[in-house]
Amino acid sequence: MIHPDKFKDMRKIVSLLIAFLLCYNGYAQLIDNKVNFYFGMSSASFSGDKVLQEGSFLSASLYPNYTKVTGKSMKALIDLNPFISIGLGLDLLDATDWNNTPYTDYKGSSTTLYSVSPVIQFHTRFKSTGISNRIKVFAEIAPVFGQSKINLTTPIFTVQPQDGSHLSVTSSSDLFQGAKESAGLEVAINQYSGVYFTYSLQQNVTSSKFYNDKQILFTQLDFGIFLKFKRDKRYFYR
């Protein structure tokens, strides 16, 4: 799981922003808009069994033994109505620092996950005054389609072509698909931008000749900015 200190830091930031907006709210109300673009940084944590057993054979899993997982995310959303938005999300995660003593199968390896997610967001309604003029609480669901690319420092097997030579294999690309559930908070700073926080759970299935993992499970914490476009009015409320 993601370290509790990260949640404490996020709660402090959110509390300060809400306090600021409550004080500032009386001076400038915002106008609703229809299109948002999001750009964020991610921190994730894989879950699952660190050692897998098939019959009497034990092997180290790949994903749950990574201790450092960070990435980037982008998303675009369009409002369908005051409570529902739809859009598309793009995510990139880099996993490093694989460790599971005494196993050394994937020591020094790195894995990058690329994924795309058609998103449906359910959110609180925008209001012309009050705290809902600047703060939005939301939940999202999305199918996930992606590719995982692993690079090894030492090969775990070799391929012998017909000419009798030996070819060491140190990389592989594997597809995965699954679902993502998220909850979060948006805080508008001004008419054009704001910040957001998202916590998500992702469950995927995969298959590879490089590892025995059949699932990719992880939680993810995102923090970033969003840009607002297509306002309903050409002027500000004062």
Image (spheres, helix red, strand yellow):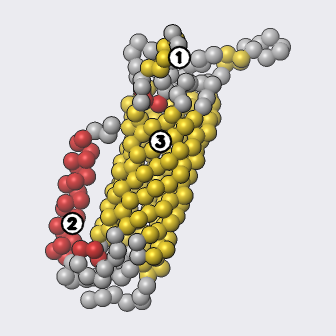
* Residue 74 in the image: above or below residue 26: above
Q: Where residue 47 sits: x, y (%)?
A: 40, 33
Place of residue 151 in the rendered image (x, y in percent of width and height, measured from the top left): 57, 29
Task: Specify which label sits upstream in the sequence, 2 or 1.
Answer: 2
Contact? badges 1 and 3 (CB < 8 Å)? no
Q: How would you rate the neighbour count of disc 1 (Cα within 10 Å): few for under 14, some for 14-19, many for 20 or more?
A: few
Within 10 Å of disc 2 (Cα), the crowding (few <14, some 14-19, many 20+) is: some
Identified at 19% across, 54% down, the residue is 12
The front one of 99 and 127 is: 127
Q: 156 or 1, which lies in front?
A: 1
Which residue of the protein is positioned furthest toward the right in this rendering?
A: 163
Q: Amino acid at mark 2?
A: Ile
Q: What's the distance in space between the residues labelled 1 and 3, CA to CA?
A: 22 Å
Q: Residue furthest front?
A: 55
Residue 123 image-quadrant placement? bottom left
Is residue 41 something one can see in this rendering?
A: no
The residue that label 2 is drawn on is: 18
Label 2 – label 3 distance at C-alpha: 32 Å
Question: Where does label 3 land, which residue?
Answer: 203
